[in-house]
Image: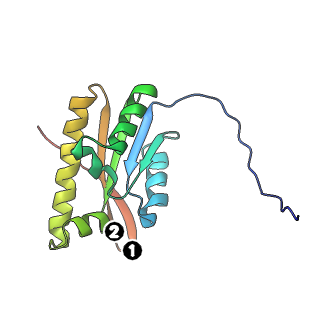
Amino acid sequence: MNKKAIPQCSYLFNGTISCNAAVFCSDERFIDESMSFIKYSLNINSFDLIVTAGGPAFINAGTGALMDNLALLVEEHNIKRLVLISHQDCKYYKKKFNNADDDEITEKQLNDLQSAKIKLRELFPGICTETYFAFIEEGKILFKEINYTE
């Protein structure tokens, strides 16, 4: 039997937990940029991560495996800062609202971000939740913080 060597990387494990987390969409067109935005624009070098279709859309349901996973991270990793990112041209939202135009879908995403922020504040008081929307402009992905007044 011929065994090929599997390339391996070795990193030091320091065991610390950053108390940061992020939730964004699994759309491969936005993953690298979302990671870079969090690391370099928000200066968050280490964070727990939930990546799924629709990103933070699952939070408004308030139940389910992803919500259970988020609750586990909040409790066990003492999450203090949570970044939520939605993005333009999201296939999850296009499928969910197949008769809606792009502006209507964006409005639904922004409303979902606001609802998620409110729900997280109720479920996990003391967590700083930040909401961002990634949009495409002149062939570039740009991130805009979405602030809500209450």
Q: Residue flagged by tag 2: what amino acid is it?
A: Ile
The disc labelled 1 sits on which kind of residue? Gly
Q: Which residue is mark 2?
A: 136
Decide which of 60, 89 is in the foreground and name it: 60
Q: Quadrant of the N terminus?
A: bottom right
Q: Residue furthest front?
A: 1
Question: How far apart are the two marked residues, 1 and 2, measured between alpha carbons?
Answer: 6 Å
Q: Pointer 1: what residue?
A: 139
Write the residue at 31% across / 43% down. Answer: 64
* Residue found at x 65% / y 30%: 14
How was the colour assigned to the protein in this rendering?
A: rainbow
Q: Residue at x 43, y 55 (%)?
A: 34
Which one is nearer the viewer's eye here, 73 or 87? 73
Report if residue 90 is visible in the image: no
Q: Secondary structure at mark 2?
A: strand
User: What mark, if any, has residue 64 been given in the picture?
Assistant: none
CB of mark 1 within 8 Å of CB of mark 2?
A: yes
Q: How many marks?
A: 2
